[in-house]
Every structure is written in structure tokens, then in C-alpha cells.
Amino acid sequence: MVEYCEGSCCRRKQILEFFGEKVPTSLCRKSCDACKHPNLVAKYLEELKCEHGVHGRSRIFMS
């Protein structure tokens, strides 16, 4: 589940595989945020990693 939160791979595939199903990434058809907007998800994850490094917090609060 850590990869689900910190990664930019297909979230639908990750959830299905977590529960034991084997599915191709193409099943998603851009229905999750990571497949629909891959560059945006990667950008936000990088920003969160930078914030964590600066502030050293383990929780992130979004307003």
C-alpha cells in the first residue's frame, strides 16, 4: 500500500493486485488519477517529497 501512496503507477491495477487479481495496466483506460494525469501525479509526489525533506514531518495536511 505504500507504493499506492508514494508511486505514480496505475492505482486501479495496484488495488486489484493487492487483493490477488492479476490484470493488465490497459484495463484502467485512464480511469485513475495516475493514468489520467501521469505528469501531474509525478509532479505532486515530487513536491510532497521535497516538503517532507524540508519540514521533516510524516503527515501532510492539505487545505
Image (spheres, grey):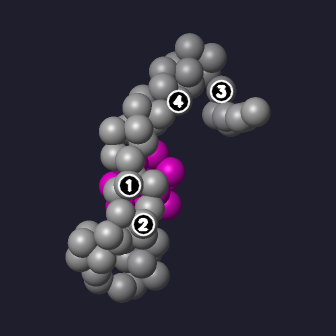
- The spot of residue 34 in percent (x, y) is 39, 53
The local secondary structure at tag 1 comes to helix
> Residue 44: which numbered mark, if any?
none
Q: Nearer the viewer, mark 4 or mark 2?
A: 2
Pick whichever of labels 3 and 4 is earlier in the sequence: 4
Pick whichever of labels 1 and 4 is earlier in the sequence: 1
Q: Nearer the viewer, mark 1 or mark 4?
A: 1
Residue corresponding to mark 4: 48
The local secondary structure at tag 2 comes to loop
Pick whichever of labels 2 and 3 is earlier in the sequence: 2
- Amino acid at the residue labelled 4: Leu
Q: Is residue 37 visible?
A: yes
Q: Is residue 14 visible?
A: no
> Residue 57: which numbered mark, if any?
3
- Quadrant, the C terminus: top right
Q: Residues within 10 Å of mark 1 (few under 14, many from 20)?
A: some
In the image, the segment drawn in magenta is 1-11
Please tell me whether residue 7 is drawn above or below residue 45 in the rendered image. below
- Amino acid at the residue labelled 2: Ser
- Amino acid at the residue labelled 1: Lys
Please tell me whether residue 49 is drawn above or below residue 18 in the rendered image. above
Residue corresponding to mark 1: 36
Q: Residues within 10 Å of mark 3 (few under 14, many from 20)?
A: few
Q: Nearer the viewer, mark 2 or mark 3?
A: 2
> 50 left or right of 30?
right
- The spot of residue 28 in percent (x, y) is 34, 71
Label pair 1/4, CB-CB below 8 angstroms: no
The local secondary structure at tag 3 comes to loop
Label pair 2/1, CB-CB below 8 angstroms: yes
Quote the CA–CA distance across marks 2 and 3: 31 Å
Quote the CA–CA distance across marks 3 and 4: 11 Å
- Choose between 12 and 60: the one closer to the eye: 12
